[in-house]
Amino acid sequence: WQSQKQDRVESIRFSLHHVHQSVIFLHQGLTRKPRRRGSSLFPPRVRSFPPLFVVRVVLLCVSLRRAEQSRAERERAMALKEKREREREEAASSSNKNDNENENEKDTPSKTQQNKTFSSSLSKFFGSGNAKPLFLFLGHLATILCSIAYILPLFGFQASYRFYRLCLQSVVATSVVKLHARNGFPPVSGIGFSKEALAMFFERMKNWFTPVQLSTDFHYMFVAMAVSSHPPFTIALAPFTCLALYHAITYMASSPAITKTFVWKKLLHKVFDALRNAQKEALVFNAAMEIGLFFSVVVRLFTRMRSIMLVFMIFNTLKMRYKSPESSYYHRMVWGHIDARFVQPYLIRFVPQLQQPLAYIQQFFLR
């Protein structure tokens, strides 16, 4: 190492000497003035300056090249030496590891067996009858807590928006699980590319999707996914939270471990009875909030947060809710109250020109 260091220092010193001599000679040649008119710029003894300067520059380049080559050779030698030492260490460690594995093979199970055991236990848990109700209960509980944390910004407004997104995500997750429990997976197996196979596939998909699109879970999943990419709609969380509250309290009432507790007997039992007696009012409230969401989206068209596509999606969701057997009665009731208390006495009375456009919109809505 000392010899290599000395060689490198000498090469650098030689290069710097050549550079210094060339700069001095160039300075002397440029600063001298000619002795008489018509003489050359350089004196007689300096007229050979340009070729000499070129020679010095060439020598400097050659010396720098040699120094670079010697440095590269030293680096390659050091890298090769380190590589051999690393390979020797890896071979020694692998031999020790194999010896340890052979010694512990009889006592501890392998990693593959552990993964198989974990996957089998996980599939057994989700395949059991209590797994889906428990998952749905936790999802509904997350919806309730996240909506409360959004309405009451105890952790700051930025965290409040995160709770809003988490509430929508929990709604989507619980809706997907309930749709799978009720209708199963889409019949996508055995798809062919012939005309008859495609016709049969679309027929199976139509038969599967017809009851799905009439369910409340599909409608709420669609609305949650539609509003998740837009600024928050507080009114959109109202039907989600109300439905989650009913499902969560129903699961708690059906669990013997919860109904035997002191909290259930003193408090939650009264809440359950009150919610059960006000079930019709809760369904009417959900229908009113769903229609209110549509009007809030329409009002937002006159702001910078407008979205015509969102208006179209919510409008079609209301059409599906109006025709769904689960919510048709309550939506008809709310629309009837809107027509009797606002449209006829105020809107049509003071702006009669809107009667014909409203009739066209009603025909398109009921189509």
Image (tube, grey):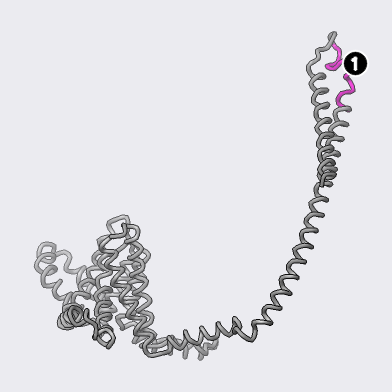
Q: Is residue 236 magenta?
A: no
Q: Residues within 10 Å of mark 1 (few under 14, many from 20)?
A: few
Where, by quadrant of the figure, is residue 202 drawn?
bottom left
Residue type at mark 1? Pro
Q: Position of residue 4 (x, y in %)?
A: 83, 45
Residue range of the region highlighted in magenta in the rendering: 38-51
Instruction: Name the residue nearer the viewer: 74 or 188.
Output: 74
Work out whether 103 lies above or below 306. Answer: below
Q: Position of residue 262 (x, y in %)?
A: 21, 81
Of 60 and 119, the residue lying toward us: 119
Q: Residue at the spot x=61%, y=83% of the render? A: 110
Assign a secondary structure to mark 1.
helix
Residue at left 68%, top 78%? Answer: 100
Residue found at the very far top of the displayed protein: 36
Q: Quadrant of the C terminus?
A: bottom left
**Relative to residue 301, is residue 22 drawn left or right?**
right
Residue 12 in view, yes or no: yes
In the rendered image, residue 351, in percent from the top left (x then y), is placed at 13, 62
The residue singled out by tag 1 in the image is 44
Give the answer, above or below, for where 285 lies relative to 277.
above
**Residue 102 vs residue 312, the one in the foreground:** 102
Asked whether residue 297 is in view, the answer is no
| Residue drawn at x 37%, y 64% as measured from the top left | 229
Q: Is residue 43 magenta?
A: yes
Residue that appears at 82% across and 50% down: 74
Give percent across and percent down for residue 167.
33, 70
